[in-house]
Image: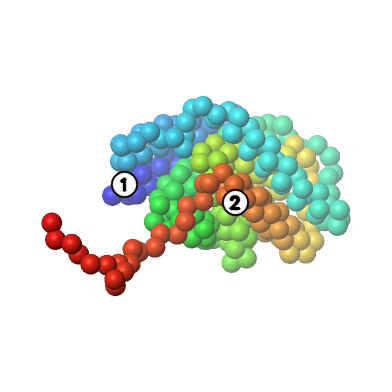
């Protein structure tokens, strides 16, 4: 039942927060406030429900290291998406026409913060962590990554390739980021940095959502395999490739730090074992 209670509490926060943010669409300042409020409230809700259902310290959201973890994650996310855009631009498929809108980017801070925090708490904090307990790190990474990709099939302009791309570049990478650090702060930062760079800086679609209101007035055009088409650059082969590289880096760190949980095997009683009566 702990999975049910944890998912129910976090889904409630995500849905209520999402509805509030959607209700003020077009007002960047209210979007900023309500988005940040959703992100901030989701953290104590997670701490409360996990602490109550598992009766343990919630170390994956320890206050110590929160700022540095989020900060490093944001830098990684922005740099990673910037590298994707740079490669698309080198092929002539991303062009900047001038400056965009600062207020639009401000609103996207709240929107993307709410999405990053609630999704990480749900998919990495609850699903990945609990599946990992039973199956080990690699199987949990694969299963929850696939589920994360499937969840994006409900987005506008989504298709099977977009779901597969999200599963590999985001589902796998963010789970690996958690495995490497055993805190949720780094994957939250990476998730936010990637999404905000895509929308708030480079003004591209994010997983099919029309969020072209960032700091740059830019146009993306060209082959879907390179640009991601209407789904946005997350459907680009560059995103998939760089996401796989970062997944490998994070998993290497996880292995080096002894954070990889092996696959559980059922204990097999040896045929030669004899039972000694007491």
In the rendered view, does 230 fall on the left or right side of 131? Answer: right
Q: Is residue 278 visible?
A: yes
Within the image, what quadrant is residue 111 found in? top right
Please tell me how crowded label 1 is: few (under 14), some (14-19), or many (20+) other residues with Cα within 10 Å. Answer: some
Tell me what residue is drawn at x 14 percent, y 61 percent.
277
Query: SS class of the residue under badge 2?
Result: helix
In the foreground, 223 or 192: 192
Tell me what residue is drawn at x 80 percent, y 61 percent.
222
Quadrant including the C terminus: bottom left
In the foreground, 112 or 273: 273
Tell me what residue is drawn at x 54 percent, y 36 percent.
185
Query: What residue is shown with label 1?
Result: 2
Q: Which percent across, then down, holds residue 75?
A: 69, 37
Q: Is residue 144 visible?
A: no
Q: Which percent across, then down, holds residue 26?
A: 60, 37
Tell me what residue is drawn at x 79 percent, y 46 percent.
218
- Looking at the rendered structure, which numbered label has been put on residue 251? 2
- Looking at the rendered structure, which numbered label has been put on residue 48? none
């Amino acid at each position: 039942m702990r999975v049910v209670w944890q998912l129910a509490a976090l889904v409630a926060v995500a849905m209520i927060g999402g509805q509030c943010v959607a209700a003020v669409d077009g007002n960047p300042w209210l979007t900023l406030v309500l988005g940040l409020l959703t992100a901030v409230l989701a953290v104590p809700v997670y701490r409360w429900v996990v602490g109550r259902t598992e009766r343990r310290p919630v170390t994956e959201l320890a206050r110590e290291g929160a700022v540095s973890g989020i900060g490093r994650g944001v830098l990684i996310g922005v740099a990673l998406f910037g590298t994707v855009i740079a490669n698309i631009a080198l092929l002539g498929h991303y062009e900047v026409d001038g400056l965009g809108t600062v207020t639009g980017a401000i609103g996207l801070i709240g929107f993307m913060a709410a999405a990053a925090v609630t999704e990480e708490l749900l998919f990495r904090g609850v699903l990945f962590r609990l599946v990992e307990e039973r199956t080990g790190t690699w199987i949990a990474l694969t299963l929850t990554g696939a589920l994360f990709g499937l969840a994006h099939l409900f987005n506008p302009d989504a298709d099977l390739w977009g779901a597969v791309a999200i599963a590999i570049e985001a589902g796998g990478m963010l789970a690996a980021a958690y495995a490497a650090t055993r805190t949720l702060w780094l994957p939250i930062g990476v998730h936010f940095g990637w999404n905000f760079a895509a929308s708030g800086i480079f003004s591209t679609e994010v997983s099919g959502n029309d969020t072209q209101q960032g700091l740059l007035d830019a146009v993306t055009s060209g082959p879907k395999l390179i640009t991601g088409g209407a789904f946005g650059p997350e459907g680009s082969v560059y995103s998939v490739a760089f996401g796989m590289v970062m997944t490998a880096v994070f998993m290497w760190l996880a292995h080096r730090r002894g954070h990889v949980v092996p696959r559980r095997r059922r204990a097999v009683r040896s045929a030669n074992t004899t039972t000694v009566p007491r």
